[in-house]
Image (cartoon, helix red, strand yellow):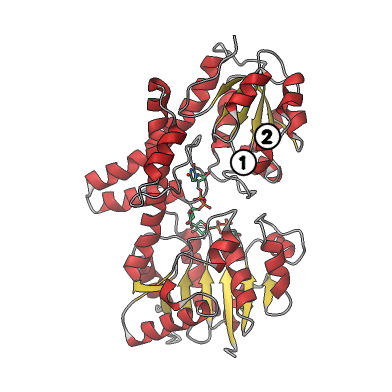
Amino acid sequence: MSGKTVTCIGAGYVGGVTMAVIAAKCPDYKVLVTDIDEEKIKRWNTDDLPIYEPGLLETVQKARGRNLFYLTDVKSCIKEADIIFVSVNTPTKTFGEGAGKCVDLQYWEKTARDILESSDRGKIVVEKSTLPVKTAEAMKKILESNKKSLKFEVISNPEFLAEGTAIADLETPDRVLIGSSQTKEALAARDEIVRIYEHWVPSEKIVTSNIWSSELSKLIANAFLAQRISSINSITPLCEATGADISEISKAVGLDTRIGGRFLSPSVGFGGSCFKKDILNLVYICESYSLKETAEYWENVLKINEYQQERFFLKMLRTMFNTMAGKKIAVFGLSFKADTDDTRESPSIYLVKKLLAEKAQVALTDPKALRNAFWAFGDDAEKIELFEDPYKAAENAHAIAVVTEWEVYKKLDYERIFGKMSQPSFIFDGRNILDGEKLHKIGFSFFALGKPPLIRD
Ligand code: UDX
Ligand code: UDX
């Protein structure tokens, strides 16, 4: 029995899910999850959880009330803790120096001060949020600026889970990374964190490193993943110009074991809370060390992503005779990827805003994310029709744009859909998930990414 108490500050997609798995796997730890958003904590205590993630409810139910507790009193959660995981959000700064690029650390610093204020003994503080390299050092300075002579150790343990597969990613991770400084006390604190993961992760997958490497590895891992998507996306217009087929290229290239087949699916652009923010942060850090060439290299990964989003929209506009005013367009998908309700940086938001600017009539459908439409679009949400049912969204539409790769969109009865659409009917597949030949036979003009178009006369 460890008899230890772990507290997590920030009950979002990272903190909420990670703590559910830790509590389920480690019954000998008491796990307290807290958040400044009281409404969120209330929902963690019901079966209507504040986020959608496959398998999450079952995992929560295993431990909730046993050793997993969701509480609104941040102070007492801090006080009781031996170990504090911090997973508050770290958005891109929108003001002042570094606006639009560097990370806004105001919540992070406030959390460090809250920890200090409510502690009456030393603790281990674990960075879960993605942070600029060297943040741990700043945090330690804040924590040790106390008159109480309390000792804190700051450990970096970045999260590599991807939304939609978060539970599996946590249960069988490729690796768990734990960074610390190399003092005796810091190494002892690091081993405390290792012991938590050893409950279910094989030791060889628990990697330790110095703290700067750990912080930076998270940024670099995300930058590499995003770079692969931009690399394959950058080839889609070349395929369209030459008659090559991007699926065949992804397959041929990915079969080289040095390259590997994953993260080579072309798309209307990557989204999510991490890739753009982390690359902007990487660029900012490089610039602040005067590493202009490195900064420009990574900035181009984002430029290609923006280009791909714009290209998709322009393809729709040009194909539909350069006018969309008054035309109904069904947009399939609001979440930034399948199996999540998260809409942060979703390419769907970009597309819908462009369509609205063209005065199109937008009908948006998504199996899980519609509840976040107001968050995603603000006042513009009133101009969009929302449909749970994709068949209703497509009724009388001139075109369908598939933006999220939800399984359900592959299985729809497109003959039925075609029968109720305006003619000529177009489908723009921004995820290459539909059977173009079949749709073409039904009567659609069909456009995928990096493939020859299948046009009806
Ligand atoms: C995470 C990471 O923490 C972030 O650094 C990473 O780069 C992206 O993913 P995520 O869990 O996805 O964030 O964010 P979110 O779902 O917004 O959760 C953060 C939570 O922290 C929110 O529920 C917010 O209310 C809470 N919070 C924020 C606090 O409890 N205290 C604060 O001071 C600020
Ligand atoms: C990512 C990282 O994968 C994860 O390790 C990190 O902890 C957080 O950031 P996430 O953003 O949740 O996870 O999802 P991910 O599966 O990486 O997808 C990101 C975006 O890339 C999505 O919009 C997705 O649709 C897109 N994508 C992914 C592609 O366009 N093509 C691909 O081949 C793979």
Q: Position of residue 304 (x, y in %)?
A: 39, 35
Cβ atoms at labels 1 and 2 below 8 Å apart: yes
Q: Position of residue 331 (x, y in %)?
A: 64, 30
- Residue, x 68% and y 71% (percent of image)? 70
Residue 101 sits above or below residue 331 on the image:
below
Mark with earlier residue (1, 2)? 1
- Residue, x 37% and y 59% (percent of image)? 132
Answer yes or no: is residue 117 visible.
yes
Instruction: Tell me the number on the disc at residue 381.
Output: 2
Query: What is the quadrant of residue 8 in the picture?
Result: bottom right
Q: Taking 303 as reference, is 112 left or right?
A: right
Of residues 177 and 282, the one nearer the viewer is: 177
Which element is circle 1 on? Answer: helix
User: Alpha-carbon neighbours of circle 2 within 10 Å: few (<14), some, or many (≥20)?
Assistant: some
Type of the residue with mark 2: Ala
Answer yes or no: is residue 10 visible.
no
Of residues 221 and 122, the one nearer the viewer is: 221
Type of the residue with mark 1: Ala
Q: Taking 302 as reference, is 182 left or right?
A: left
Q: Position of residue 5 (x, y in %)?
A: 59, 82
Query: What is the quadrant of residue 151 in the picture?
Result: bottom left
**Dot 1 corresponds to which residue?**
376
- Residue, x 37% and y 69% (percent of image)? 138
Label 1, label 2: how many angstroms apart (C-alpha)? 8 Å
